[in-house]
Image (spheres, rainbow, N blue to C red):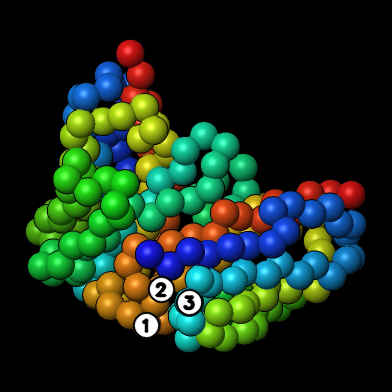
Amino acid sequence: EVQLVESGGGLVQPGGSLRLSCTASGFTFRSYAMSWVRQAPGKGLEWVLGISGTGGNTYNADSVKGRFIISRDNSKDTLYLQMDSLRAEDTAIYYCAKDNGPTMVRGIAYFDFWGQGTPVTVSS
Amino acid sequence: DIQMTQSPSSLSASVGDRVTITCRASQSISNFLNWYQQKPGKAPKLLIYGASSLQSGVPSRFSGSGSRADFTLTINSLQPEDFATYYCQQSYSTPRTFGQGTKVEIK
């Protein structure tokens, strides 16, 4: 059974940092691209970052460029999100999501499994 | 970035109704379009991928159609468990943008 479990969320002050983790099980982690998708309170879904199965390619939304970094440790089956220079508008539930293939190139690609999400609140 | 626009933003329907939600991309995205269902407090769930392929385990009352820039999600004979918010999402390019969502409520 595929499982994705996020952790590391919490309350942080504006300008602060936080590191989220997503521990995967039930599939060959290194064979699949992964993404972080967030959802602000009462709002829709926003894809923010993605990473290929090898970790060699990363992709990001403009809203987090230069502030957030996605990485993975395939030896630990774990995905990470390093968030720096946090702003109030980064307040959201952060989900990790598994892609159906190893890369994020153009094609029939979709998120077939999602974690339960971890909440991040940026406030003073 | 490719913009995804869903309509309507919300709708009210009764059990047994047929519901149609549309999604329009700001450019042609071939058939690289997915649909997700999200219930309150839960993670999204994949319903349809590649515009028209039903994800394993999803009831056959859900169907998707369309290509290039215009897509449709149809729910035949709406069931009580289908009241939720639905999102389209493109996989033609990164950022993998989502539509703003369509909330399906009970009439």
**Who's the residue at 38% across and 55% down the image?**
A47
Dot 2 alpha-carbon crowd within 10 angstroms: few under 14, some 14 to 19, many 20 or more: many
Mark 2 touching mark 1, by CB under 8 A? yes
Q: Secondary structure at mark 3?
A: loop
Q: Which badge, 2 or 3, comes first in the chain's sequence? A: 3
Q: Which one is closest to the eye, mark 2 or mark 3? A: 3
Q: Nearer the viewer, residue B60 or A88?
A: A88
Q: Are marks 2 and 3 on the same chain?
A: yes
Q: Nearer the viewer, residue B102 or B17?
A: B102
Mark 3 lies on residue: B27
Location of the N terminus of chain B by quadrant is: bottom left
Is residue A59 visible in this depiction of the protein?
Answer: yes
On the picture, is B11 further left or further right than B92? right
Q: Is residue B6 above or below residue A100?
A: above
Q: Nearer the viewer, residue B70 or A37?
A: B70
**Who's the residue at 86% across and 57% down the image?**
B13
Question: What is the distance, in whole Å, between disc 3 and disc 1 at their CAs?
Answer: 15 Å
Mark 2 lies on residue: B91
Q: Are marks 3 and 1 on the same chain?
A: no
* Residue B67 locus on image (x, y percent): 57, 86
Amino acid type at circle 2 is Ser
